[in-house]
Image (cartoon, grey):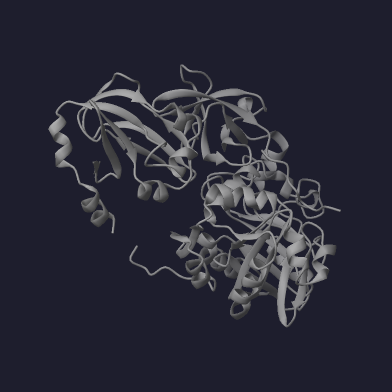
Amino acid sequence: MLRFTEEHEWLKQDGEEVIVGITEHAAEQLGDLVFVELPEEGVTVVKGEEVVTIESVKAASDIAAPLDGQITEVNPAIVENPALVNEDPMENGWFFKMTLADPADLDGLMDEEAYRAYIA
Amino acid sequence: MSEELRKTPLHALHVGLGAKMVPFAGYDMPVQYPTGILKEHLHTRAAAGLFDVSHMGQVAVRAKSGEVADAARALEALVPVDLVGLAEGRQRYGFFTDEGGGILDDLMVANRGDHLLVVVNAACKADDLAHLEAGLEGCEVEPLERGLVALQGPRAAEALGGLHPDVGTMRFMDVREIDFAGVRAVVSRSGYTGEDGFEISLPEEHTVDFAERLLGAEGVLPVGLGARDSLRLEAGLCLYGSDIDRTTTPVEAALEWAIQPARRAGGARAGGFPGAEVILGQIASGAARRRVGLLPEGRAPMRGGTELFADEEGAEVGVVTSGGFGPSLDRPVAMGYVAIDRAAPGTRLFGRLRGKMLPVTVAKLPLVQPGHKRA
């Protein structure tokens, strides 16, 4: 089941980890991405901490850690080809995987229906 | 900020095409269409892009004597360009300068035979009008409420030529009045992308119909302000307010090519414009800093405001004034000011980005080869 943040990130449970990316809505609002800088694997992050820098043709923005935890894996494909985030934000354009300090935190985030209402 | 945004004659057309609209210089303008900035940019370089530039200021300057040469002489008091020597049907780039040699705005001046047509930046047009009215002797200054569209790219001539064959014989910086089946337009072969192309000034009420006819031509797509910015950046063209302003002189901005010999020391009409002493002095002995092209080595764009250093330890030598991603070069591109001893192409500097020192190389402008039709 997908969860969403107010910062337009999606989170998907994948075994012990959650996969994090940005929503189609966010990708569309940002415009064509030209640069992505990802965190180092293994770093501990706190909710709200800026962990990813992205630049679109228009401007730079930061992506915050959606919850407390540890980054376990990053997606090199979007560093190589930032346009992948625009083309496939919900699948191949994922940003990083993380383990959560408290897996129950996930339940505090919006579900798909709530997110749709949020962006409507 | 509560002031209502103005709309160009093409506003409804942009909205109908699905454009993303943003406030720009007091107007509600399209930053991009559903095509997206990257593809709009690349399409303009490969085929043709249609831009709405109706927000820009168009001003007719007429001498009370009726002689265009008198209007040219009067305008030379504000602009350090040889306007007396500007032939009928030709256009020149120039700028208003202030007493300190700074740039108040940059502009295009065309000799229309019986008057001068001056095109200025949207954000500056109210100030420019007041400046013209106060500074021009024996002239009438008339702001024109007309539409202005730019058709840019290697297929622009073919597309506009489909509406009237005469445009094909125009050279870069020619200006001509052309009757497009009852729509009398003033066409210049110029633009702000580094490509061949045209800017077409026409009555407001015909602007939508004309734009739709151009969009119906093969190879033409609407292009927004986002791609306009990346196109002009690659072409090394200044954006007023970012790359040039009152704190930069034409010599620092590497724009002395626009000051012809007639206005320089020893010329027939040397000086006689605001800031002449500073500007002519800098032409003679150089300025301490210079606008240059910049190519960041990695993939991270260096935007305006990025500080530049001689080495990683940090002696500051300049600043980026505009920067972003250059789709045609498929890499970050920028321009900025650096100390004159760091201005040679190939000089390696460092830009401080999010606390990191990243290498950037000084490059010759323009960063892409222009496609202007000069012969």
Q: Tell me if residue B101 can be seen.
A: no
- Give the residue displayed 62% in from the left and 29% down from the top: B362
Quarter of the image where one finds residue A91: top left
Quarter of the image where one finds residue A11: top left
Quarter of the image where one finds residue B189: bottom right
Furthest-top residue in this view: B313
Image coordinates of residue B138 in percent, x first then y, are: 68, 74
B255 vs B208, left or right, is: right
Image coordinates of residue B218 in percent, x first then y, are: 70, 62
- Give the residue displayed 54% in from the left and 64% down from the top: B125
Instruction: Indicate whether B140 appears above or below A40.
Output: below
Q: Tell me if residue A23 can be seen.
A: yes
- Which quarter of the rendered picture does the N terminus of chain A lie within? top left
Q: How many marks?
A: 0
- Give the residue displayed 37% in from the left and 47% down from the top: A24
Instruction: Indicate whether B160 appears above or below B300.
Output: below
Using the image as rendered, state which of residue B59 and residue A24 is in the foreground: A24
Instruction: Indicate whether A29 appears above or below A11.
Output: below
B219 vs B23, left or right, is: right
Instruction: Indicate whether B363 appears above or below B94.
Output: above
Using the image as rendered, state which of residue B217 and residue B255 is in the foreground: B217
Image coordinates of residue B273 in percent, x first then y, are: 67, 55
- Which quarter of the rendered picture does the C terminus of chain A lie within? bottom left
Image coordinates of residue B11 in percent, x first then y, are: 50, 70
